[in-house]
Image: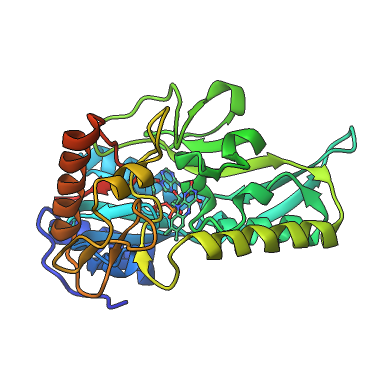
């Protein structure tokens, strides 16, 4: 990453000075975001901040609140399209203490795993396997962070985050650190909502989660994880830039992939954006796609599926920026 001296629109020299002093070498002005998304597209962030602890997170939330700057929480960018104009706000990545993973035994003998939102979900899964803790195998092979997985209620046919999570740690838009039990959250297919207030450009930030586990045998758990990975390899495109499944499956009937396949769209391309010939619900970047090419292909798919099947597909990926 380059620490540019960029003339960020919207930031005064005093603002830039404060950010650089507060976050030091973790402050990046006009930072291109394509390298932070699995699709490899997206313009620059006005500022990208790598925040390592709760005090830093609280400071930036309060600072942006006083100045009415929007902020955006970037996970691993595996379910994300940043538009080509980038993000005119503060983009936050959680590092340092937000990447910790620890097991805790409670008084009743149950073990839970506390994971920071910035930790990789893959690390959480292998931690569980190594420590003989069952309950998270559904998540094997899902890329991204623990925070992204919680926000997306990530999952597979085997289960989803909502099945395993007990408590979510969250910072509200005033910088207050709190926790919500899983019951205080409304979980549904690839989404979750809670009652904490949010405004455009300012939403509560997930800082971690506690997952309940059952005792398991590490060898059996490892075999199960290997099976999940093999199944993915056999059914999904690999070695390509994508965001996984692009559209949500409709509540009933054919899956999004089947609808797209039946509309004859596999292999359809706009510029460097292409419907994967392997899986109809994956849009891949074949090399030099732009976000706008991916979004044009998305519109075309939605229109064709609507014309042919009368079904309006809803994107699963999050689309942000200008
Ligand atoms: C090859 C591939 C396979 C995939 N397979 C699956 C699968 O099987 N099942 C599945 O469910 N998904 C799958 N996905 C999609 C993606 O991996 C998940 O949605 C993942 O949970 C996103 O995590 P992330 O850290 O990359 O989030 P990002 O893409 O960075 O962000 C997604 C959204 O979450 C928000 N967010 C992220 N972290 C936080 C936080 N700490 N606080 C508040 N908001 C936050 C972002 O602002 C954004 O709105 C796949 C993706 C790829 C590329």
Q: How many marks?
A: 0
Residue 160 in the image: state x and y as whole percent.
58, 39
Residue 168, compared with residue 125, is above or below; it is: above
Foreground residue, 312 or 199?
Answer: 312
Horizontal relation, residue 147 to residue 229: left or right: left
Foreground residue, 193 or 229?
Answer: 229
- Residue, x 20% and y 57% (percent of image)? 294
Q: Can residue 318 be seen in this view?
A: no
Image-quadrant location for residue 122: bottom right
Residue 232 in the image: state x and y as whole percent.
55, 60
Residue 68, compared with residue 264, is above or below; it is: above
- Residue, x 23% and y 43% (percent of image)? 70
Residue 67 in the image: state x and y as whole percent.
20, 42
Foreground residue, 262 or 321?
Answer: 262
Foreground residue, 204 or 234?
Answer: 234
The residue positioned farthest toward the bottom in the image shown: 2
- Residue, x 68% and y 60% (percent of image)? 227
What is the basis of the colouring in this image?
rainbow
Residue 41, compared with residue 257, is above or below; it is: below
Q: Can residue 187 be seen in this view?
A: yes
Image-quadrant location for residue 82: bottom left
Residue 295 in the image: state x and y as whole percent.
17, 52
**Can you say which quadrant of the picture contains the N terminus?**
bottom left
């Amino acid at each position: 990453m380059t620490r540019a001296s960029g003339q960020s629109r919207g930031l005064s020299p005093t603002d830039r000075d404060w950010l650089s002093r507060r976050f030091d070498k973790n402050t990046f002005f006009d930072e291109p975001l394509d390298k932070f998304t699995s699709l490899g597209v997206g313009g620059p962030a006005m500022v990208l901040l790598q925040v390592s602890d709760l005090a830093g997170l609280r400071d930036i939330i309060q600072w942006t609140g006083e100045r009415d700057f929007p902020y955006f929480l970037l996970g691993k960018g595996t379910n994300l399209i940043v538009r080509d104009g980038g993000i005119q706000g503060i983009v936050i990545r959680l590092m340092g203490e937000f990447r910790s993973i620890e097991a805790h035994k409670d008084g009743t003998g149950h073990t839970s795993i506390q994971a920071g939102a910035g930790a990789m979900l893959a690390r959480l899964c292998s931690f569980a396997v190594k420590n003989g803790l069952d309950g998270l195998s559904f998540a094997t092979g899902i890329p991204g962070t623990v925070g992204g997985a919680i926000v997306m209620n990530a999952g597979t046919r085997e289960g989803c985050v909502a099945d395993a999570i007990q408590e979510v740690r969250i910072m509200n838009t005033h910088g207050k650190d709190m926790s919500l039990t899983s019951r205080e959250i409304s979980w549904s297919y690839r989404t979750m909502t809670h009652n904490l207030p949010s405004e455009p450009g300012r939403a509560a930030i997930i800082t971690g989660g506690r997952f309940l586990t059952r005792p398991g045998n590490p060898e059996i758990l490892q075999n199960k994880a290997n099976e999940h990975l093999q199944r993915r390899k056999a059914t999904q495109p690999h070695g390509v830039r994508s965001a996984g499944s692009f559209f949500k499956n409709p509540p009933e009937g054919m899956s999004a992939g089947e609808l797209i396949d039946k509309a004859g769209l596999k292999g359809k391309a706009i510029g460097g954006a292409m419907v994967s010939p392997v899986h109809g619900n994956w849009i891949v970047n074949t090399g030099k796609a732009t976000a706008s090419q991916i979004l044009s292909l998305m519109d075309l798919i939605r229109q064709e599926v609507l014309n042919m099947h009368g079904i309006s597909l809803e994107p699963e990926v999050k689309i942000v920026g200008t």
